């Protein structure tokens, strides 16, 4: 079933969809009167709807049922991702959203080769947010994960203090993830480096702030592979692949 996100917290018995979503439903998917779609609100309510009318600018739907969306993991995971080269961040955003990430914070660390200016970064962030939306629709998420403004590594370390647990993945070694995930954390931050990884001083700074250095095994993963492997391990260890 087609899956879309509404900007409204509540949807009435009859609801009209405008803009890009309406065009996608009518022009791309070529959906007609009588076909079913799902709408999810920012507060995580899931509405099963049937199309009652379409035209060039809008799609009208009738709500058949509503319930709390149950597709979200029970842990809020924030990815602090050091900027990789090229368009690798596009792939990272897309796949991490599919795997259940809740928020993505792009980070400039010491070994980042990619260092766009502020204007370029905002354009990239908007593109990444659109990729997150499309991935959330495809994977039937209950939320659209936020792609935040890019921050320096030191700022990211300050921001991560709101999490219950923080993990910095370090190619020079650390603890297995299963040994770090004590209890049932509700919010977790994971730091992933760019192609050059993190400098030792950055790892030490994160550890002083309470983060734990972790390993993903003896093999060195590419910058675009590491966040997917790390997130998969976290989701598995917390029972979100059950």
Image (spheres, grey):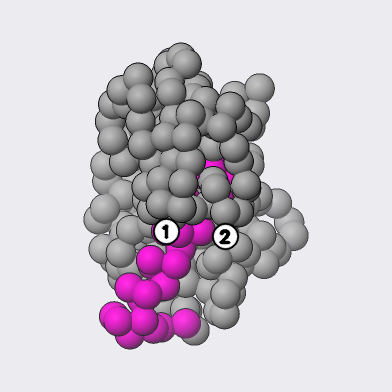
Q: Residue furthest right?
A: 219
Dominant secondary structure of the magenta stretch?
Answer: helix
Q: Is residue 54 above or below residue 73?
A: below
Q: Residue at x 62, y 58 (%)?
A: 226
Q: Is residue 141 above or below residue 10?
A: below
Q: Position of residue 52 (x, y in %)?
A: 48, 29
Q: Position of residue 242 (x, y in %)?
A: 66, 22
174 or 31: nearer the eye? Answer: 31
Q: Quadrant of the rendered structure where residue 137 is?
A: top right
Query: What is the distance, in whole Å, between disc 2 and disc 1 at their CAs?
Result: 12 Å
How many numbered callouts? 2
Asked which secondary structure carries label 1, the reply is helix
Whether residues under marks 2 and 1 lie with C-beta atoms below 8 angstroms apart, the answer is no
Can residue 205 be seen here?
yes
Q: Quadrant of the N terminus?
A: top right
Q: Residue at x 33, y 85 (%)?
A: 117
Q: Which residue is mark 2?
A: 92
Asked which secondary structure carries label 2, the reply is helix
| Magenta span | 114-140
Magenta span contains residue 233 = no
81 or 172: nearer the eye? Answer: 81
Q: Which residue is mark 1?
A: 129
Q: Residue at x 47, y 35 (%)?
A: 53
Among the two numbered marks 2 and 1 on one chain, the one whose residue lies closer to the N terminus: 2
130 or 224: nearer the eye? Answer: 130
Can residue 143 be seen here?
no
């Amino acid at each position: 079933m087609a899956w879309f996100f509404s900007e409204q917290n509540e949807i009435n018995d009859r609801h009209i969809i405008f803009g890009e979503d309406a065009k996608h439903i009518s022009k791309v998917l070529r959906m007609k009167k009588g076909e079913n779609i799902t709408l999810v609100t920012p507060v995580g309510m899931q509405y099963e709807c049937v199309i009652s009318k379409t035209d060039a600018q809008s799609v009208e739907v009738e709500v058949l049922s509503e319930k709390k969306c149950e597709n979200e993991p029970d842990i809020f995971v924030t990815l602090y991702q050091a900027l990789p080269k090229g368009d690798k961040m596009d792939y990272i955003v897309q796949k991490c959203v599919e795997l259940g990430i809740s928020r993505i914070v792009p980070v400039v660390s010491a070994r980042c080769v990619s260092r766009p200016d502020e204007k370029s970064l905002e354009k990239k962030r908007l593109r990444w947010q659109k990729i997150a939306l499309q991935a959330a629709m495809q994977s039937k998420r209950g939320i659209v994960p936020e792609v935040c403004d890019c921050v320096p590594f030191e700022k990211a370390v300050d921001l991560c203090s709101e999490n219950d647990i923080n993990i910095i993945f370090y190619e020079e070694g650390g603890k297995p993830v299963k040994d770090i995930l004590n209890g049932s954390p509700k919010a977790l931050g994971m730091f992933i480096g760019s192609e050059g990884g993190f400098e030792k001083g950055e790892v030490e700074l994160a550890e002083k702030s309470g983060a734990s250095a972790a390993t993903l095994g003896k093999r060195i993963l590419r910058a675009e592979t590491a966040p997917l492997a790390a997130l998969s391990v976290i989701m598995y260890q917390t029972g979100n692949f059950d």
